[in-house]
Amino acid sequence: MRLMVTGGAGFIGSNFIRYMLSQCEEYTIINYDALTYAGNLENLRDLERNPAYTFVRGDITDAVLVDQIAGSGIDAIINFAAESHVDRSIDDPGIFVKTNVLGTQVLLNAARKNGVSKFIQVSTDEVYGSLGNEGLFTETNPLAPNSPYSASKSGADLLVRSYHETYGMDVNITRCSNNYGPYHFPEKLIPLVITNALENKEIPVYGDGLQVRDWLHVKDHCAAIALVLQSGRSGEMYNIGGNNERTNLQIVKTILHELGKPECLIRHVGDRLGHDRRYAIDAAKIRSELGWQPQYRFETGIRETVEWYLQNEPWWKRVKSGDYMRYYEKMYGSRLVKA
């Protein structure tokens, strides 16, 4: 099976590519990524010489290049490509609408035109909005996004659904809870806490820090998407959650404890605009229909994640300094584009 993985140089996308190539020799993968600030080819440096892996530098809003790749015998498109940081969406909503909505539409058009057999839209639980103290998000929850980021992902999801209903395309939408694990860009909570603590820097916590998130190890997420690719029913949505609810403050204190760092590093800052109070996923559907089960307990997964950052200090220091952009331009040069 020949896959086009968009956003494959990012956190979840790179983990997915590595997972798929380790699971089955029948897969060949084109990693299509624009290499914006969160895309990093170092994430997949170990696969450079793998004949089943090809990298193409490109934007998902580039209809000509997307069509060229989709027309090269692609069997499935898995769309990870997205602007994904809520704070950045508050500052500049336009780029989120362009990439997340228009880019998804370009991919859908190319998939339809070229007869791509399966399209998977990798979405987020944030499209459902905020939960109270009780209950879980199910696939039947109405969309109620509260940030420009989640609104743009909601729009993309609706486009994907419309291509199934209108054109009969075989599509699936997956909505995951917060991921964690190796190669996570250090602007997000867990890698930010780890790396700041290792540098003895203050750790900013929004508001009271009691916002609740359900945490999912990225490898469990990748396994779930693989099952959807193989067996997902056409037109269906699947929630993917780790059943690991923690407050942000609990996460921060857990990491500080793992690193032996003092809690005095915590600094409460003004709350984020439109900050959702709680997310929690009901993953019963993917468990019952496709037999997926998360393998990671949070306590084990967070310990392994902390250890990964301890063992990969050059990676995260390059990312935090911005030197990784210059680093991979120097390392890869003209090989950044292989169409």
Image: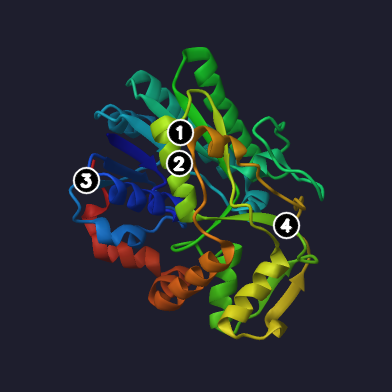
Kindly check if marks 1 and 2 are in contact, taking CB atoms under 8 A apart as contact.
Answer: yes
Question: Where, quadrant-wise, is the C terminus in this rendering?
Answer: top left
Numbered circles on residues, count: 4
Q: Earlier in the sequence, mark 3 or mark 2?
A: 3
According to the picture, the residue beneath numbered tag 3 turns out to be: 52
Kindly check if marks 4 and 3 are in contact, taking CB atoms under 8 A apart as contact.
Answer: no
Which residue type does callout 2 highlight? Answer: Ile
Q: Earlier in the sequence, mark 4 or mark 2?
A: 4
> Which colour assignment does the render follow?
rainbow
Q: Identify the secondary structure beneath mark 3.
A: loop
- Foreground mark, 3 or 2, reads 2
Pointer 4 local density, CA inside 10 Å: few below 14, some 14–19, many at least 20: many
Q: CA distance from mark 4 to mark 3?
A: 40 Å
Which residue type does callout 4 highlight? Answer: Val
Q: Earlier in the sequence, mark 4 or mark 1?
A: 1
Can you say whether 65 is above or below 134 in the image? Answer: above
* Point 43% across, 46% down: residue: 223
According to the picture, the residue beneath numbered tag 1 turns out to be: 120
Can you say whether 182 is above or below 114 in the image? Answer: below
Considering depth in this image, is 63 or 155 the residue closer to the camera?
155
According to the picture, the residue beneath numbered tag 2 turns out to be: 225
Which residue type does callout 3 highlight? Answer: Ala
Can you say whether 78 is above or below 164 in the image? Answer: below
Which residue type does callout 1 highlight? Answer: Ile
